[in-house]
Amino acid sequence: MTTFVYDFSHGDKDQRELLGGKGANLAEMTRLGLPVPPGFTITTQACRAYLAAGELPTELPEQVNEHLSALETAMNRKLGDEADPLLVSVRSGAKFSMPGMMDTVLNVGLTDATVSGLADQAGDERFAWDSYRRLIQMFGKTVLDMDGDRFEDAIHRAIEGEGVDTEVDLPVERLRTLVEEFKQLVRQHTGRDFPQDPRQQLWQTIEAVFGSWNSPRARLYRRTERIPDDLGTAVNVVGMVFGNLGPDSGTGVAFTRDPATGTRGAYGDYLPNAQGEDVVAGIRNTVPLTHLAELDSRSYQDLLHTMDVLEQHYRDLCDIEFTIERGRLWLLQTRVGKRTAAAAFIIAAALVEEGTINLDEALGRVTGEQLSRLMFPAFDLSDERPRLATGVAAAPGAAVGAAVFDSQRAVEIAESGTDVVLVRRETNPDDLPGMIAAQGILTSRGGKTSHAAVVARGMGTTCVCGADGITVSADSFTTVDGTTVREGDVISVDGETGAVYPGEVPVKPSPVVAYFETGEVPVGDPLVAAVDRLMRHADSAARLGVRANADTGEDSQRARRFGAVGIGLCRTEHMFLGDRRELVERLVLAEEDADREKVLAKLLEAQRADFVDILAAMDGLPVTIRLLDPPLHEFLPSLTDLEVAAATGSTDQRLLSAVRRMHEQNPMLGLRGVRLGLVIPGLYDMQVRAIGEAAGRLRAEGRDPRPEIMIPLVADAKELALTRASAQQILADIGVEAPIGTMIEVPRAAMTAAAIAEYADFFSFGTNDLTQMGWGFSRDDVEGSFFPRYLELGVFAVSPFAVLDTAGVGRLVEVAVTDGRASRSDLHLGVCGEHGGDPDSIRFFHHIGLDYVSCSPFRVPVARLAAGQAAVAESDSDSR
Amino acid sequence: MTTFVYDFSHGDKDQRELLGGKGANLAEMTRLGLPVPPGFTITTQACRAYLAAGELPTELPEQVNEHLSALETAMNRKLGDEADPLLVSVRSGAKFSMPGMMDTVLNVGLTDATVSGLADQAGDERFAWDSYRRLIQMFGKTVLDMDGDRFEDAIHRAIEGEGVDTEVDLPVERLRTLVEEFKQLVRQHTGRDFPQDPRQQLWQTIEAVFGSWNSPRARLYRRTERIPDDLGTAVNVVGMVFGNLGPDSGTGVAFTRDPATGTRGAYGDYLPNAQGEDVVAGIRNTVPLTHLAELDSRSYQDLLHTMDVLEQHYRDLCDIEFTIERGRLWLLQTRVGKRTAAAAFIIAAALVEEGTINLDEALGRVTGEQLSRLMFPAFDLSDERPRLATGVAAAPGAAVGAAVFDSQRAVEIAESGTDVVLVRRETNPDDLPGMIAAQGILTSRGGKTSHAAVVARGMGTTCVCGADGITVSADSFTTVDGTTVREGDVISVDGETGAVYPGEVPVKPSPVVAYFETGEVPVGDPLVAAVDRLMRHADSAARLGVRANADTGEDSQRARRFGAVGIGLCRTEHMFLGDRRELVERLVLAEEDADREKVLAKLLEAQRADFVDILAAMDGLPVTIRLLDPPLHEFLPSLTDLEVAAATGSTDQRLLSAVRRMHEQNPMLGLRGVRLGLVIPGLYDMQVRAIGEAAGRLRAEGRDPRPEIMIPLVADAKELALTRASAQQILADIGVEAPIGTMIEVPRAAMTAAAIAEYADFFSFGTNDLTQMGWGFSRDDVEGSFFPRYLELGVFAVSPFAVLDTAGVGRLVEVAVTDGRASRSDLHLGVCGEHGGDPDSIRFFHHIGLDYVSCSPFRVPVARLAAGQAAVAESDSDSR
């Protein structure tokens, strides 16, 4: 027979999968001898069985009844006993904390019959009726799915009618009638009476917790957090202890360190004479935890001791929920606590310092996401500031600008030199120009998967979505408290916290970036010291090298300072824009060899200078230079513009006709990359010559240039063989050597990697194009069109352009790695798509055995950290 | 030691790989005791060694010398013997016949010293000097790479100077001085004397033959014919026999059956008193082979006997090169002869009838390409017709139309209702509109891989390229004999033979198509009888089913008559064009649910009628209906048109803004297929309902509709899971069942086929899109742009849109087949891309275990034939 129920005295913190996080930690604390009320956990397996079958497992009632009996014995009370009733709380708890699920029902077991028994036992009639009122309210909202406002309205009417300040001041008689009113509401809503059988209350609650696993909010949350759908939740049934038994009772939350800064100490909040949901509801103000020392010094000392035990035991910051019942401390929950990015680094380093964890473990305590957040400039919030609103922190950064409510206006104002924040109810593809022009984006609707959020993250623009209570009109927005912000009014949007402030909040540069720029650790800066310590360890552990994508000498220098061990992608197309664009247009349109050669000669000179700059900046380190790649149309005027010009006035007919001829329906799938190289005579030869001559010049000066030549968009070995042969000839003529390799960015290249490897010294995976062609969608066209809908539907949990889709695109990469190395064992393998800077993707690249990743200079530290983490995680799992 | 040289008395016809086709057949004939002059073959392996090392294998000279000695003994003459010299011919011969390579040098061994010995022995001084002249001429052209015109000019001068008709009439003294002139030409060209050492002549010739394997023409030929580059050629050294020894000598070509019709008999040509190259040069007119009976009845009888032996032995039509030397027959070459498409079928069936081969073998004697040519209408050439020119038959068919020399004019004239043939020097992408408008295309430059050829084959338009000797100007073309064709003059272009005729040649419909339409075999039509016999055998052997791609009831009926066992692809997008396009535009632009629903209701009715038609036509057979797939922009007005309209006058601003918003840079990679289905509410539901209701209606009438619902462009299992769930719900509501499956046309779908198969009853491989996305190029954009260059460079030998690229795209298909079946063993697998009608691709699909292919109705017979051939070839190779 399957065991579906575990007593708290069985189980431990490692059983989160089965007992949920809350249950596992309650068991762990029980095992440690800490004061946890007796109780038991119904497993996630029971939940899964319930969801699959649509009904509770047949073995469950008997097992629950057995544990209930044990609980009654332990508490020395009986459920439904009219003289001295046992009450329990029912708390959900999945493996991962999940805000979308129903959470807690307290005071289960109270009925018309037992309420006076409770009053007698507690010697407090008010307490008993207050508890009963709370039960019906919570049960109604969470189990019966009733609108909470209906209960709140009734309470409000009672307070007004009695002329008191809060519901704590309601006289007991009024509480009695309030209970009657609540029961009436339940009857109206469900057509049935509030259940007077305590066991029925319990079973209905258990089923409701199980069912809430599949609520729309829970599903959405799981999707955005990438939590599997098939885990299920556990249910904890706990003997009630009461924080609402008078001034010597209360409830609170404690942290073993400051979750904002990581400083060791006792942090948290306390609310006397209250039950847990009062803290959440925020109706009454809490006091700082340290005040408990004055209110109840013995309980405070007990709590400090408990905190010490937990931090030592969990070897990390813990957060704790507790209740004090008439001077006695009870622990209701603990877990490793959430913290800010800065605190994560400081705590990890401090724990190493204290000898609690080693450096490998410390690396596992921070994330690349946290490091990247620390590298954004942040608002200086040393002064308290009122907020206009708070929303979902959808894309990080700190944006300050004039509020603008229209995309076109945003473009105009931004072009006039004023920073803007685009404010919209929600965004759609029409808003794209304004979103690009804005420093920040603020919406009143939608969450992390809304159009605004998806697009902003893609563009790296600060974004706060779904700001609570603001009302956006065509030319202003109004906050809950009636403040109106009009076009031109400056606001500050915090993509880190979701806060929206009036006026300009000063921005302070990131000390972490300063550290990476200079390599210096300021005395007395615990954050930078912690980052330094962990980065050094990451570098020493990493097997993957981290290179940077950089196209200029300046970018290369920054990349080098940020720790790049080479350039993994130097794009030459940027070098063809600006003044030189006209030359390329002439090259593409040239009909005579002589014209073409004249242009090529000019470009050769310019390109050589470009390469001298970059190779000099990266002296002694490899620089992978990709030959010209972009679609043809990027060098030509827009056909639509030319057609409009032709229709409205004069136009260059020869140009129009050439552009018409070369116009492509799908430039992404047209004449690009090596195709251009093979079709336009002399183009690639010129580039190879420029690279060779630049290297030759530097070598003559005693420097150590290390260019690598990379051929883009190869789909077939023959394309590479032809291009490689010409390039080798040119390099031999100049007397310079350079590895010649290829991008693997077309699915067919991955599938025929064995043949391609015969002509390649290296592969560099272009995962952007591989994602586009592998999925069959172009980033430009889809991120703003159907991605939001796809995220909502759960087709993917995150854009495959942000995190590598390992099942599909990753499998293509794996095939190419395996076949390429089988064909040529010394093949050097890297990745230069944007995924090269994403920690999850880096873990995969490490796992499949690449030699390096390459990413934007700014992401280099994040990639270094992730590379170290991947290596540590692997050796960790190896040693198990 | 490697054996590099084989005597004709060793070896047989199955050693083509080693001895080349010519050498293997010479050995075979020797083995059969037929009169072959003595000789030996230097192997292809020696050629490969030569090409790899750049020099002849060291063992080769000794082996050749040994065999030369044996040859001298056999011929009873010695090489270089001044009194009675041995002469030899040197003939190349690769595994496959290859026009690009150098072919033959005759009379090797003649020098200033030996020429009079030959004259003495033959008793014919003229013959000896004529032979010497021929040697220098052939050696100069093929071994020394000299311009043949320089020799021809000298001959012409001699003929003019002597006032005779042909060079046969030149007096011996003039031949002597001609030889001196030729030797002088050689000296001028090479700076060295014509070699006077017979062995040096021989070795230079052998090296030249080996080297010609890699000549540009040979490489190009191999590419277009898909012959591997690493086979190498053999060299045959044969004792000379002379057809130019007087009127009782001669040379000719014989066929054991008529290569045009397949009729048994003695066909061919004979040229008295000549050497082989005279026949090729066409300077003197040959006589029909049957005249030989009068000229030399004994030799003729010998030849007929030999032909009989060879046909019995090779069990096929043979063609034979022979020489008669003073009344004695010598065989110089035989091979299984080329034949027309009709003859191929007739011969194969006749050989079965005669009991020579069985039906399995007969299937291997015909090709899908031949069957497809038989299904084009052909010119009725029962009357002899003069040709204007002859070119490369680049794309089949028979086109008649007014000659037009400009793309735009072609469009105008075609729009006025006149059929046109576009005539250009060569075509480029600017000519595309005219090429589309034309019935046929004729160019004066380029071959099978030219822009015109590639595009024409892609469009299925008749095309003749590189027509010899025509000169194309802006408004006319002129033939070699000075005829001028101007715009509007009607010409007829034969894509089957490359012939260009003046005026309108009548076109006769294909009797093979009539047979497929009716199933009837007219009495006394050997072709249709042969096709019928082979098709019936193919159908009985085939494992692959053949379905058709059809979108209307009419097409479905034709497909059924042509033997389709179902519809593999019914595209619904065509049903949305025409009148209904406006509805779809409204649907796409709808902002309110009510608008959308109104449109959907109208479309439902129309779609239901469409499906009733098709399902009724295919009663009892499966019909796979693909839900809407095409890119969004196909339903919207062109953005460029709207922008031009907006710039020049009034426009619908709402429409312009919507089209701007929905405009995609790369519609092929945008909002298509299942993405549209998931994004536009109700669209797919409407289609599924229409299918379900159509099926329900027919079932109610007692019919047997078998719809299958196919979801396009799925890249992830979740897309299919969501769509399938809605569709199943709708079908269940209607009370109809239908398999639901998906296209596999996106590379990621292939890589994640195991997951997708969990929600699919069938996969249908969309190899068009899989090719586009696998290679990363869109067919629309590349076939006219870089494909010709790629074919020229040998990146591919044939467009991957015509023949499946098995190494890359095929591997994706294989992965999906293996993983899909592993996940779901009863998964039904088909292919509905255009490759479904290509014989080579069909062989691959058979091999990897698909259940069916689907192709256009007209290709169904070809696919049936190919499916049968694939099955026979497999069981054949199994039984070995």
Image (cartoon, coloured by chain):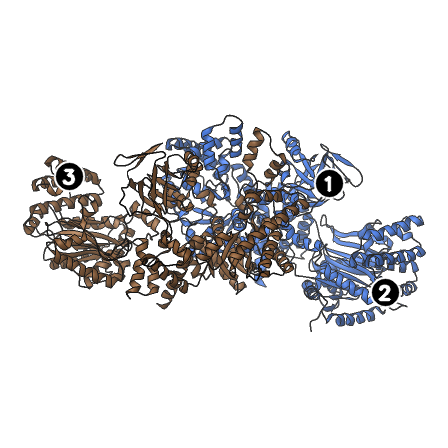
Chain colours: A blue, B brown
Check disc 2 and report its element: helix, strand or loop.
Answer: loop
In the image, is B13 to the left or to the right of B369?
Answer: left
Q: Residue tagged by mark 1? A: A500
Of mark 2 and mark 1, the one earlier in the sequence is 2
Q: How far separated are the C-alphas under marks 3 and 1?
A: 98 Å
Residue B607: image x %, image y %? 58, 51
Q: Chain of mark 1?
A: A
Count the labels in the image.
3
Amino acid beneath label 2: Gln
Q: Amino acid at mark 1?
A: Val
Q: Which quadrant would the N terminus of chain B be assigned to in this image?
A: bottom left
Same chain for the residues under marks 3 and 2 in the image: no
The Cα–Cα distance between marks 3 and 2, rounded to whole angstroms, is: 123 Å
Please report the residue visible at 56 percent of the width from the left and 50 percent of the height from the top.
Answer: B628
Please give the label number shown on residue B712.
none
Closer to the observer: label 3 or label 2? 3
Residue receiving disc 2: A196
Circle 2 packing at 10 Å, graded few (<14), some (14-19), many (20+), is some
Q: Is residue A667 above or below residue B856?
A: above
Is B250 on the left-hand or right-hand side of A551? left
Q: Chain of mark 2?
A: A
Between disc 2 and disc 1, the foreground one is 2
Report whether residue A760 is seen: no
Of residues B540 and A471, the one nearer the viewer is: B540
Residue closest to the eye, A156 or B670: B670
